[in-house]
Image (tube, rainbow, N blue to C red):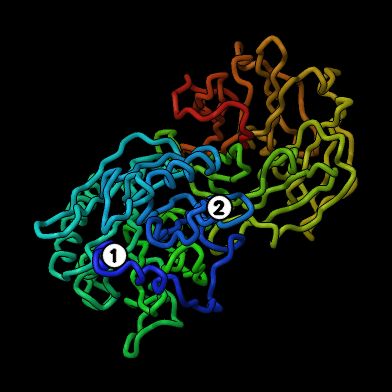
Amino acid sequence: MSRRLAALVSSLVLVVGLGCGTSAAVADAPQPETAAPLRFVAYNLCGNMCVADGTGADDAHRTATVVAQAATGGWRADYLFLEEVCRYQYDDIAAKLPAGFTGVYAERLPAGTVISGRKVCKGSAYGEAVFARGTKVGEQILTLTVGAEQEPIKSPCVKSWVQNRLTWACTAHLYWNEAALREGNARKLTDQTRAWEAAGLPVIIGGDFNGQPGTTTTDAFYSPGTQQGSGDMTEVDETDGDHFPSGCTSGHCRSGEPTFHDGRKLDYIFVTSRFFREVVGDALPQDATVSDHRLLRGGAAWADCGALSPGAAGLFRIDAAGLLYHYAGQAGGTLAGACKRGYGWAPSYLTHVARQGTTLVAVDRDGVLWRYPADPANGRYTGGTKVRAGSGFGGTETLLAPGDIDGDGQPDLVVRDRQGTLSRYPGTAAGGYGPPIAIPAAAGVPWSTYDLLFSPGDFARDAADAPDLIGRTADGALWLLRGDGRGGFGPATQIGTDWQIYPAIAAAGDVDGDGNQDFIGRDTTGTLWFYRGDGNGGYAARSQLVTWPDGEPLF
């Protein structure tokens, strides 16, 4: 809170008192392994006033504290909302965050500002900042000043693709001295964010609002369902029953854990209600060596990312950080927005992954086969649900989960090893797999002939009513091998040429909902192309989808 700077004019001694006190952790703290997939952090860094020794040690600890919230082994934050941050601190944090973060800094006091004979921020600028983990496509610095504030009130905002969704995110630091001015700041901020929401863009606001949950300052943000709110947003900690006020009987109340050292809640993370669900929040214990505020964590899920149905079409993708995403199919042959379904799926650990209904099957680097059933409530995949399904798969070159290829009603696995042998692992009623059975080469053509194999289900929709295979040879020819329903495949029929342009081809199910199986290819530029199956072993001309980094696993 920049009341600190005003207080400095009359007393520099007050600085020491603002760093005192701690708050205990609470039992409902969300954990990185289980919290909703989109993660936020809001933290008033007290960057000018809480540096004690002048050696830089406090600054180093402050930077490390923020960066740790974005680390793979920690909270893995996607957005960071930082208040009272010196420009040199912002630059240090920006340099040390994991790859992929972009930021915006809003200067509130210029470099060289002196108060009571002391340089603010060691002579650098002073203000607020926002970071987002994703490609930045725009930014704005909103001026929220309404007239009589002692300092300009500014909000840095970043427009970026995060988890393959376009969002706006803004850091708020509302005025600290007069409630009427603070309420004016809030109205100016929500006027802009509502315009973005009306254009179909989700908005996240985090920061120090200098007002408690029951005040008129926060009315502008809370949705009407939370005790006379007049906004359209949900606060991440409004579901924390440990802090509900008396008389609030709903599951969402204007409350939350205290975030300031004197027991008040001043820090918030708000998300547009219609775009998000499963909000959760937690204020960490105060670290007085960094700030007089507690760091506020928050999480949310995209509103359209629910449980997966067994036959749901779409594409799974694993990014460079090992995060697992699913993109549902849509009418017209397009893909919906990304739904983050898990983490820890990096190819360095899981070398092969295939989808079998709502279950994912994977081979790890030790050759162990695992089944990952989706959480029925939210469609996510975690280590807590995985089941060991076999071992000795270290020689796997291709892993396919085509469905029931032998007609016994159980989904099977098909594996090609590095020697070119193709084997069927019959599915069992218990959800496991029996011993491998070699699949004879179709018409004597070795399985090693194909540099790529995938299974789009019953692509031909013929009398056998069985999953088929599609193979590509080195010259780019595409071949259909029709399943016979008895665990084998018929002679190859050529169905295409020039497919060598695709390093990856994925069976995505019935993407467009016309009843036929489709597939998607990714070219060397990372562009994805949709191929609509015709239900007779062929496909229509391709249509362009999106562009993703080359080399990422698709299935």
Residue at the outermost bottom position: 246
Residue denoted by label 2: 64
For the C terminus, the image quarter is top right
User: How would you rate the neighbour count of disc 1 (Cα within 10 Å): few for under 14, some for 14-19, many for 20 or more?
Assistant: some
Decide: is 242 above or below 49.
Answer: below
Q: Quadrant of residue 429?
A: bottom right
Decide: is 35 above or below 418.
Answer: below
Residue at the (80%, 36%) spot, across then down: 415
Mark 2 lies on a secondary structure that is helix
- State left or right for residue 83 relative to residue 406: left
Residue at the (36%, 56%) spot, across then down: 83
Residue at the (29%, 75%) spot, across then down: 212
Q: Can the viewer see residue 209? A: no
Q: Amino acid at mark 2?
A: Ala
Q: Quadrant of residue 300?
A: bottom left
Mark 1 lies on a secondary structure that is helix
Query: Is 316 in front, or is 457?
Result: 316
Residue at the outermost front position: 117
Residue denoted by label 1: 8
Query: Is 447 in front, or is 224?
Result: 224
Coordinates of residue 411 in the picture (x, y in percent):
73, 48
Residue at the (69%, 41%) spot, across then down: 354
Task: Name which of mark 2 and mark 1 comes first in the sequence.
Answer: 1
- State left or right for residue 451 relative to residue 554: right
Q: Amino acid at mark 1?
A: Leu
Coordinates of residue 192 in the picture (x, y in percent):
20, 50
For the N terminus, the image quarter is bottom left
